[in-house]
Amino acid sequence: MKAELGWARGTGGFAEQRGLRRGEWYKVLEDQGAGWLVLDVNNVQVRITKEHLLVRRYAPKGWSVVRLSPEEATIEAKKHGHANDELHRMHLVCPACHTRHHVAGQPREVGCPKCGKTFPVDWSDQA
């Protein structure tokens, strides 16, 4: 059985241009050495440099938190057809199915509207 190589997520615009979504952790499929990793991005193998990634050993066990700048919130509101208000300037990313979910306040646990699983919110895990 092959050992798990870990999980990674993008740290900026470079990674997002390669199809990685902010706050979402992707399984590392291959470490190609010389600073390159291959990730499973929605069943597509994506090769990306480690310098644009945050890498961890284990899969996330809680919701990731994504806070948007006012400019990013405006773009997201237009893209997804929702209000550009305080509620929509932050969203969580489900560790199981990667669904984005907007919440008010700072709940300790949140149930995912897509997969139905409940996870703690890791308020220290901000992308």
Image: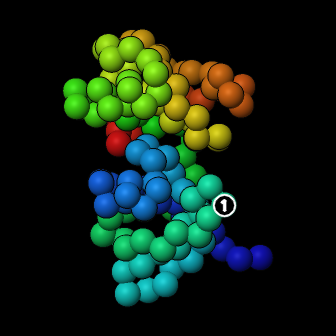
Query: Which of the 4 image quadrants contains residue 73?
Result: top left
The quarter of the image holding the C terminus is: top left
Where residue 2 appears, x then y in whole percent? Answer: 71, 77
Single out the residue that lies furthest toward the left: 70
Q: Does 70 appear above or below 2?
A: above
Which residue is tagged 1? 43
Q: Quadrant of the N terminus?
A: bottom right
Answer few, some or many: residues within 10 Å of disc 1's Cα (few below 14, many 20 plus, some between 14 and 19).
few
Mark 1 belongs to which amino acid? Asn
Residue name at image x 37 percent, y 71 percent: 50
Image quadrant assignment for residue 91 = top left
Residue at figure coordinates x 30%, y 54% from the top left: 13
- What residue sits 39% from the left and 40% below the top? 125
At x 63%, y 25%, the residue is 112
Q: Is residue 40 left or right of residue 47?
A: right
Residue placed furthest toward the bottom = 34
Residue 79, relative to residue 111: is it above or below?
below
**Residue 22 horizontal/vertical position (percent):** 41, 45
